[in-house]
Image: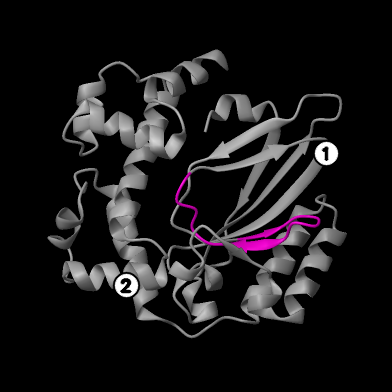
Amino acid sequence: MNPTAGEKKFQLWRYLPAPDLSFFVERYWIVQWDLRGQAPYLSETLPYPCVNLIIQKDKSRIYGVVKRKFSILLENKGWVFGIKFKPGAFYSFVKSPLSNLTDGSIHLWEVFGAEGDTLERTILALEGECHAQMVEVAQNFIRERLPEWDENVMLISQIVELIMAERKITKVDDLVSRISLNKRTLQRLFSRYVGVGPKWVIKQYRLHEAAAQLADGEAGNWPKLALDLGYFDQAHFIKEFKTSVGRSPGKYARGIEVSF
């Protein structure tokens, strides 16, 4: 959220996984900041239907899907290393419903045992400077623990890609009409493998589109934007946007404009 302002406060790098890991891992990411002598900065991010393994001094955790915006206060100097798993993919590592992890987090050792602590120490020892080495350490760690191929993970990946690609999918019924699953089966699959229902995933990607348009200065025609994103009226769209983002589309757009 508010990418222009964020660029002035921190640096973000993204790295794609090796081909043999791309079935499970979407990307590796690193955030670094140096705000010494400056006021702290509240970084806010709209969530995706993904699990993230995060390594940070005294704060390393595995985070499930967060259903509302994720906020973190950046202050002084620091860095974070993360592994973003593809939607549904982390289920293969834990073999338990990811709905148990939604809006929550667990220690690395709860999934990977003592080796999770070793991963944390090894990456922290690199002190955020050697990006290639951090990615290599993470890749080797995942590669040595690759779970068995799960056809449901592939199915979920295809469904999420369909949701992202087709803006006309605004309801679960729209999605069901395009795939070979009934609504109840789809809901159970997403609850178990992703941690949230397909309705939330659809709504979230449409809200991402709205935020992106607002960031690009396309803030004029609220009724048309609401209709394009599948909302029956402008008031419903504004309510949903405010619930997820924390402020109305108008206030969000004005905040973006201030940062230019």
Q: Residue at x 69, y 75 (%)?
A: 141
Horizontal side of 41 relative to 100 (left or right) equals: right
Tell me the residue at 74%/42% (across/down).
Answer: 32
Q: Quarter-wise, where is residue 109 in the image?
A: bottom right
Label 1, secondary structure: give it: strand
Give the residue drawn at x 20%, y 50%: 171
For the residue pair 59 and 123, the one nearer the viewer reads as 59
Left/right placement of residue 219 relative to residue 51 reads left
In this rendering, position of residue 23 left or right of residue 54: left
Where does the image place residue 98, in percent across and percent down from the top left? 46, 70
Query: Which residue carries the number 1 mark?
Result: 77
As displayed, is residue 40 above or below residue 106? above
Label 1 with label 2: CB-CB less than 8 Å: no
In magenta, the rendered stretch is 53-68
**Position of residue 214 measured from the top left corner of the image (x, y, whole percent):** 40, 25
Is residue 61 rendered magenta in the image? yes
Residue type (three-letter) at the residue carrying disc 1: Lys
Q: Position of residue 210 (x, y in %)?
A: 35, 32
145 or 187: which is nearer to us? 187
* Kind of residue at badge 2: Leu
Mark 1 surroundings: few (<14), some (14-19) or many (≥20) residues within 10 A: few
Residue at the limit of the structure toward the left, as seen here: 177
Q: Residue at x 72, y 60 (%)?
A: 60
Q: Residues within 10 Å of mark 2 (few under 14, many from 20)?
A: many
Where is residue 130 shown, x and y percent of the image?
A: 81, 54
* Disc with the residue nearer the chain's start (1 vs 2): 1
Q: Is residue 163 above or below residue 190?
A: above
- Point out which mark residue 189 bears: 2
In the rendered image, which quarter is residue 58 located in?
bottom right
